[in-house]
Amino acid sequence: MSKMEARRSWSISEESLRRYVHYASESCIQDLLSASDPSKVDGWKVVALNAGGVEISKRDSSGSHPVFRSRWLLRSVSAQQFITVANAIDAARQWDPDLVEAKYIKDINDNLSIIALRFGDASKPLFKNREFIVYERRETMADGTLVVAVASLPKEIAAGLQPKRGKAIRGLLLQSGWVVEKADDDACLVTYVLQLDPAGWLPKFLANRLITKLVMIIDDLKNLVEECPPLDGSSPSS
C-alpha cells in the first residue's frame, strides 16, 4: 500500500465494522422497500416499458447520480427460486462477462458479508478496470418479502480491508438491491434498484444510458434461474 493510500484508509475494529455495516445496510433495506412500494411515488418517472412487461423508472437524487429502478412480475419463477441468484456476485457476472474476480472478504454474520468485485480491461465502460468493495445483506421481512441490499463501503474503510490494486478505479455502488415479493406459488414481483457512481470520467448521458440497460438485470437473472435445477428436483416451469 502506498503512503497516499495509507493516509486514505481507516483501520477499523471488527465491532466497529459490524456496527457500521449493520446500520448502513438497514438504511439501504428501508430505501429498497420504499422504492418497491407502489403507493410511494417519490419523484419516480417511467422512462421505459419493455415489451416483456419490465417497467424502468428513474428518480433524480440530491447528488449527481440518479436512481434507477426496474419492476417485473415473473409468472414462471417463485420468490425462493429468484432469491437464490439475486446476489452481488451473480449480478456482477450478468453486468459484465469480464468480471475477473469476485470473492468474499469476510462474513459479518450469517446474512451479512463483505465482497470484492474486480472487472478487467475489456469490460464495458461502466466497469472497465474498476473495483467495488461492497456489503451484501439478505433479509426476510415479517410478511415474507425477501430483500437483498448491496452497496459500497466508504472508500477509506474499503482501502483498509482491501488495498486498491494497480491502476484499478474504485467505483461506488451508492445503493442497489432486490425486493422479491411472493405473488403466488410460482410467481413473484421483483423490484431492482441501482444507483451507481462509476468514478473516473464518463459522459453523463452515456452513463445514464448504460445504467438504464443494467436495470434490465431482472431478465438476465430470470434466465439464470431457468437454467438452474429447480429446488424441489422437478422439471423447470416453462
Image: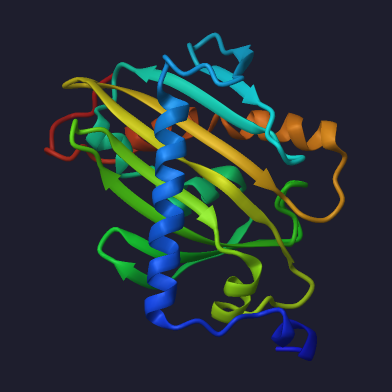
Q: Position of residue 176 (x, y in %)?
A: 52, 43
Answer above or below: position of 173 versus 70. Answer: below
* 153 or 43: nearer the viewer: 43
Quadrant that contains the N terminus: bottom right
Quick check: can you spot residue 102? yes
Q: Position of residue 46 (x, y in %)?
A: 61, 14
In the image: residue 12, left or right of residue 87: right
Q: Residue at x 26, y 31 (%)?
A: 79
Q: Where residue 115 sits in the image (x, y, percent)?
A: 47, 65
Q: Is residue 13 left or right of residue 152?
A: left
The quarter in which the C terminus is drawn is top left
* Viewer can see residue 97: no
In this rendering, the answer to whether 28 lies above or below 104 is: above
Which residue: 29% across, 20% down? Answer: 76
Q: Residue 215 sits in which quadrant?
A: top right
* Residue 85 pos. (x, y %): 36, 44
